[in-house]
Image (cartoon, grey):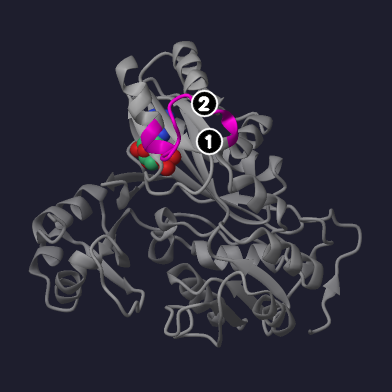
């Protein structure tokens, strides 16, 4: 381990005193997917070194940095990561609790394990958001069908039933519109449980009021180990089959709502004493109310637009935050539309982005291609994204429409 500078008099971050790590230091990344890869590419440009831990031999991050190839919950491998790095971060939130504890004991993990513990569980997460004074959709904890019925009666339908842990991209949840759907939803979200099962057999569930939102937005906020906070402009997110399809920036909501969304995200990141990035997903209602839906303590797909459209990218900001450098300027330099490239779009997207694009020229759109280097392309798998820099987001959206690549 390299000797690190200890900043006297600063608040403890994640239980460990903040340290400033200058370029030349090594950042260990738990996870070697596309987020780790883009973090490493960005941080390498600043002079940081990286080492990633991932079970896959040819992982996206391992193609650009040294990699320890082992399971995420392999304690020996985690120990090796700790020995080879000056600071540890992660690119996914479902980090094994034992590994997180081991790393915080044996290494410097400025994000700590408390933030992971909170964001791994919807009920804990909602409680933390509320404690920061930020609204979430009204919700109840549910542990049995009887509790579900009582919760639905209390909140009023429609509602959304979700598992408290493990669900992502819309998995592990069901929308309930009629009382007759309660039992089926319960069986779907808590499979294998008898209708009247006692709470001991039922995974923890949460019932949320269904918010009839006008749109979904997200704000990526950053907090450095010494407490500086900044947020990126909100992205308006459009999902298809529960997978992010487009991020549109500036979001098509009034500036006042954009400002408020940034304030709320900053309030959460400060309230939770988070270090690094925190992606805050929100619903915007017709009358301009904001409800936070979900948090992710890492770089986020909806922040990929920052790579080409902001003064500082979310990846550089994360590196700055965990290394305790001053945070970078988050100003948006140009309107942008980010479109995700899934397995089924890969070939067409590469062809479109690598040949003369009359349509883009006509529209004044500059497509910036990012491909993650995943060896296996599958339908629905995130393979890359394109940032469409444009004068107006309508032009970027017209390009997406006209290229006709995203119709499947
Ligand atoms: P989540 O897994 O919580 O991010 O939910 C996936 C998607 O389901 C969200 O992006 C929303 O489109 C939708 N959704 C989740 N919760 C609610 C809710 N309380 N009201 C309306 N839509 C929701």
On the question of residue 217 being in view, the answer is no
In-front residue for pair 104/223: 104
The residue indicated by pointer 1 is 202
What residue is at 74 percent from the left and 83 percent from the top?
Answer: 83
Q: Is residue 153 above or below residue 130?
A: above
Residue 144 marker: 2
Residue 86 belongs to magenta span: no
Relative horizontal placement of residue 308, taking residue 9 as reference (left or right): left
What residue is at 26 percent from the left and 57 percent from the top?
Answer: 390
- Asked if marks 2 and 1 touch (Cβ < 8 Å), the reply is yes
Q: Residue furthest right?
A: 9
Q: Of the residues under marks 2 and 1, which one precedes in the sequence?
A: 2
Cα–Cα span, label 2 and label 1: 7 Å
Q: What secondary structure is marked by label 1?
A: loop
**Ligand 1 positioned in quadrant:** top left
Find residue 365 and report its image quarter. Answer: bottom left
Range drawn in magenta: 187-200
Residue 196 belongs to magenta span: yes
Quadrant placement of the C terminus? bottom left
Q: Main secondary structure of the magenta part?
A: loop
On the question of residue 54 being in view, the answer is yes
In-front residue for pair 139/365: 139
């Amino acid at each position: 381990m390299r000797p690190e500078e200890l900043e006297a008099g600063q608040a403890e971050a994640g239980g460990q005193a903040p340290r400033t790590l200058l370029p030349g230091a090594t950042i260990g990344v738990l996870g070697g997917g596309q987020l780790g890869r883009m973090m490493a590419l960005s941080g390498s440009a600043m002079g940081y070194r990286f080492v990633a831990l991932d079970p896959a031999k040819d992982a996206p991050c391992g193609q650009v940095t040294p990699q320890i190839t082992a399971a995420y919950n392999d304690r020996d491998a985690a120990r090796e990561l700790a020995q080879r790095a000056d600071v540890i971060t992660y690119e996914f939130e479902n980090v094994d609790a034992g590994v997180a504890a081991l790393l915080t004991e044996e290494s410097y993990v400025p994000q700590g394990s408390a933030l992971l513990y909170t964001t791994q569980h919807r009920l804990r997460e909602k409680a933390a958001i509320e404690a920061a004074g930020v609204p979430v959709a009204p919700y109840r904890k549910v542990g049995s069908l009887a509790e579900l019925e009582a919760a639905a009666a209390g909140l009023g339908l429609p509602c959304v039933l979700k598992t408290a842990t493990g669900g992502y991209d819309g998995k592990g949840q069901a929308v309930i519109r009629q009382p007759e759907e309660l039992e089926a939803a319960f069986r779907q979200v808590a499979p294998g449980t008898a209708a009247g099962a006692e709470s001991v057999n039922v995974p923890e569930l949460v019932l949320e009021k269904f918010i009839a939102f006008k749109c979904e937005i997200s704000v990526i906020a950053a907090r450095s180990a010494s407490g500086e906070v900044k947020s990126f402009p909100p992205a308006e997110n459009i999902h298809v089959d529960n997978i992010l399809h487009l991020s549109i920036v500036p979001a098509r909501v009034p500036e006042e709502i954009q400002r408020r969304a940034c304030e709320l995200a900053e309030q959460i990141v400060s309230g939770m004493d988070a270090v690094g990035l925190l992606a805050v997903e929100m619903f915007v209602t017709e009358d301009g109310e904001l409800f936070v839906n979900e948090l992710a303590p890492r770089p986020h797909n909806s922040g990929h637009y920052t790579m080409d459209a902001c003064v500082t990218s979310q990846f550089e900001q994360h590196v700055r935050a965990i290394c305790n450098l001053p945070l970078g300027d988050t100003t948006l330099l140009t309107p942008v539309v980010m479109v995700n490239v899934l397995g089924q779009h890969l070939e067409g997207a590469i062809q479109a982005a690598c040949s003369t694009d009359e349509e883009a020229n006509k529209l004044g759109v500059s497509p910036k291609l990012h491909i993650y280097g995943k060896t296996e392309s599958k339908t629905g798998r995130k393979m890359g994204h394109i940032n469409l820099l444009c004068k107006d987001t309508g032009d970027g959206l017209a390009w997406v429409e006209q290229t006709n690549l995203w119709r499947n």
